Image: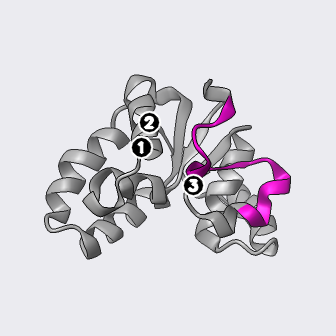
Amino acid sequence: MIWVVDASVAVKWFLEDERDDNADLILERIVDDPRFFAVPELFSFEVYAVLQRLHPEPLKVYSKGVLPILEGGILRYPMTESLAKRANKFVKKGLTGYDACYAALAQDLRGKWLTFDRRAHEKIVDMGVSHLVTEGRPKEWN
């Protein structure tokens, strides 16, 4: 299974006040075997923007922390017309355009979107394409 990593997971790796054991577990798994993980292209922009607002050394952390992850074998998926069309159905269920892209990518890859966004997850829980990281590790990881 492919796991689509939300920006809400990644920022927890780099913001001391946001640290989370479940997020750290995801990072460990990405480092161990990145081929089972993917991000839409907007992921890097979202993480960069959050770091710029909240981290004391945002460029350093992005360059030394985020870029190695992105360049380490994780699938970086571009925005395409077909992804936009699939994302549209998630927007109609109440997700933002950003979140809809993560969910659509997870569905396209027959995977799951790993997110800390409870409200987004609850809007699409019936579709089986998201996992709320605050609930612990995905059952498939046991």
- Name which residue type carries label 1: Asp
For marks 2 and 1, give the CA distance: 6 Å
Q: Secondary structure at mark 1?
A: helix
Q: Is residue 92 above or below residue 100?
A: below
Is 131 or 37 nearer to us in this picture? 131
Task: Pick whichever of labels 2 and 3 is earlier in the sequence.
Answer: 2
Q: Is residue 73 visible?
A: no
- Quarter of the picture holding the C terminus: top right
> Which residue is denoted by mark 2 in the rendering?
25
Label 3 secondary element: strand
Q: Position of residue 127 (x, y in %)?
A: 83, 52
Whether residue 69 is situated above or below residue 87 in the rendered picture: above
- Is the residue under label 1 in contact with that under label 2 (CB below 8 Å)? yes
- Of labels 1 and 3, the one closer to you: 1
Residue numbers of the magenta segment: 122-139
User: What kind of residue is marked 2?
Assistant: Leu
- Per the rendering, the mark at residue 115 is 3
